Image (cartoon, grey):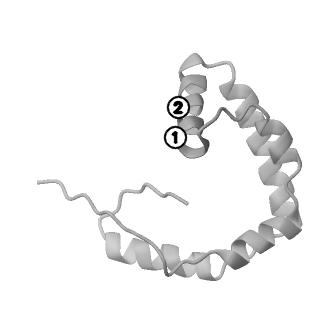
Amino acid sequence: IEFYAESEKPKDFIEKLIDNFKNIKITKEQLERYKKVKIASIVMNSDNVESVSEDIINDYITWDKIIDNQIEIVRNMNIECLNKIVEDLDIDNNATVVLKQK
């Protein structure tokens, strides 16, 4: 999981982020809403050449192949699998990079 954020108080932000992850609860309704939004986003982005190019590059970096069935993957998400992923998250194993402007 990657996060990019800007904050005047990065330590406070990081603490809150980790605390939120440790206490995350996702409902079936939230998952269904996410799926609808994600599918709409995939469809919209498919009309943008730059976005498609970024997706292809990210797919190769992350998976070493193009993921051409994103909508199918999203549709097949279920709450049981998601809860298992959340349960298995190791929040204590993380890395943080803070960039400070000079």
Residue found 50% across the figure and 81% down from its top? 92
Q: Position of residue 72 (x, y in %)?
A: 85, 40
Label placed on residue 53: none
Q: Mark 2 packing: few (<14 Cα in 10 Å), some, or many (20+)?
A: some
Say which mark, if any, is on residue 61.
1
Is 10 left or right of 93, judged from the image as shown? left
Q: CA distance from mark 2 to mark 1?
A: 6 Å
Asked if 12 appears above or below 60 in the picture, the reply is below
Q: Residue at x 79, y 72 (%)?
A: 83
Give the amino acid type for the residue marked by disc 1 in the picture: Ile
Q: Quadrant of the rendered structure where residue 77 is?
A: bottom right
Name the residue at 55% across, 23% down: 53
Judging by the rendered image, the residue that carries numbered circle 2 is 57
Q: Quadrant of residue 63?
A: top right
Local SS, label 1: helix
Query: Dividing the image into 4 quarters, which one contains the C terminus?
Result: bottom left
Label 1, residues with CA under 10 Å away: few <14, some 14-19, many ≥20 = few
Vertical placement of residue 68 versus 61, above or below: above
Say which amino acid is labelled 2: Ile
Residue 58 pos. (x, y %): 54, 37
- Contact flag, marks 2 and 1 (Cβ < 8 Å): yes
Across and down, in percent, residue 64 comes to 59, 39
